[in-house]
Amino acid sequence: MEPRVLRNIVGGKPVETVGGKTSEIIDPVTEQVIALAPVSSAEDVEHALRTAKEAFKEWRRSTPAARQLALLKLADAVEARADEFAAVESQNTGKPLGLTRTEELTPIIDQLRFFAGAARVLEGRATGEYMEGHTSSIRREPVGVCAQVTPWNYPLLMAIWKIAPALAAGNTVVLKPSDTTPMSTLLLAEVAQEFFPAGVFNVVCGDRDTGRALVESKIPAMASITGSVRAGMEVAASAAKDVKRVHLELGGKAPCIVFADADLDAAVEGISVGGYFNAGQDCTAATRVLVHENVYHAFVEKLAAAAAETKTGRPDDEDVLYGPLNNANQLARVQGFIERLPAHAAVKAGGHRVGEVGYFFAPTVVADLNQDDEIIQNEVFGPVITVQKFSDDDEALEWANGVEYGLASSVWTASHSRALAFSRDLNFGCVWINTHIPLVAEMPHGGFGHSGYGKDLSMYGFEDYTRVKHVMSAI
């Protein structure tokens, strides 16, 4: 089968790039080329940004009701074509088809509808006379053109997290998807053109140079990226030169603290699913488990058994929890962590590639690790769960907080007071109690430290795409 030829969506229609350069999109299941995507030049990017800037003149003046209606219509269209979206996402990423439909398309539709509603409930202080003879009021306004970059682990979901609040607030968008997973984002942009004015939502494909041109342009008022710490630092440094607003959702190294009074079976089930779902390619994945010494060996044994029962495979296999890693580089990265394990580490399950074709990696458990080990300190982004043994609450807290990331964490205990104390003291943007990984549209998602700043989802995420203006008049 001939590879599909993809095109940017700019100004409401597919467009050719100036140089005509393309990159191959590889199916991570078969390692075959399934599409050719444009590699946008700086000139292509600037054209898209100018288009978005022109569209902003009218879109910023649209009513919240109009923006809500457009997003609701988009949500309905995605719902009507959910099977198609799931199939495209599954083909491009290798994700299990059934789980993509239930675990990703369902929240995607819900989140579009949430931000559609958010468009009409902006908060602000009451208009009033705060100085004698003067009336003050607050305006919440869109920031302008938003440059957005999304990752390859959840291509469509992350696109929604970016565009829904931005468009709901009255901004216009130029979004660059990951160079390995542009297909579902382009489909989304194609569908969206029916409901949004031309130029409001634009997609340009490309590589790191494309993303760099997008962020460095003078046109965007805001740069938003979900990606690696390295990429986030580059975006922040670039944006600082032009004093752009920046929104960063970067890596994670989530600690899961299992105390001696925890329900071990529930903890093993929750952590194994939270660690292996989407092949562990999730910044909030349950990758780093700290277990009290009294239950350490029992927990490791149970977790290794759960890993042995967890299945990876092709998207059409209904029994698999996860598919392949996204690309050859990521497979090599995960393998490298295992190859460099210190002598004291013990691989209790997995630790190897599965099959000779496709980027599949076995569900893996690595135990007996120390706090300063590379695999503890750095994000693996694969189906690898590490386990450490702690002796008391102070040590557990010190080790849990002893990384540069601060996105998500979980506490597994029967003690209400301990759960409250750790939810206070853990330096992570989310603390789950006796669960791990659920997210809802109404609650914020975002981290501290090297995990970035700004919030996705919730009214906090919506407000990140607005600016506050004080208006005062004499009376």
Image (cartoon, rainbow, N blue to C red):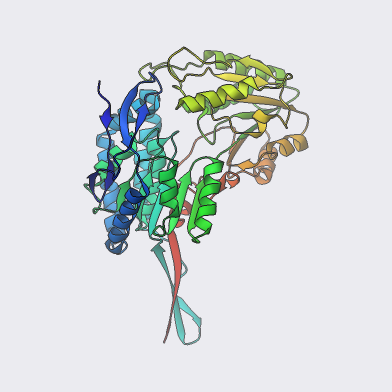
Q: Can residue 266 be seen in this view?
A: no
Q: Position of residue 160 (x, y in %)?
A: 38, 43
Residue that appears at 71% across and 25% down: 369
Which of the 4 image quarters holds residue 406? top right
Count of numbered marks: 0
The quadrant in which the C terminus is found is bottom left
Left or right: 214 with respect to 280?
left
Residue at horizontal 65%, vertical 22%? 340
- In this rendering, the answer to whether 52 lies above or below 438 is below
* Residue 474 appearing in the image: yes
Above or below: residue 91 compared with residue 38: above
Residue 459, percent across and down? 45, 53
Left or right for 36, reference 355: left
Residue ID at (40%, 36%): 179
Which quadrant of the figure contains the N terminus? Answer: top left
| Residue 27 or residue 437, whichever sits in front | 27
281 or 113: nearer the viewer: 281
State which quadrant residue 15 falls in. top left
Report the side of 318 relative to 422 (left or right). left
- Residue 457 placement (x, y as % from top left): 45, 47
Relative to the observer, which residue lies in front, 435 or 335? 335
- At x 37% / y 49%, what residue is drawn? 42
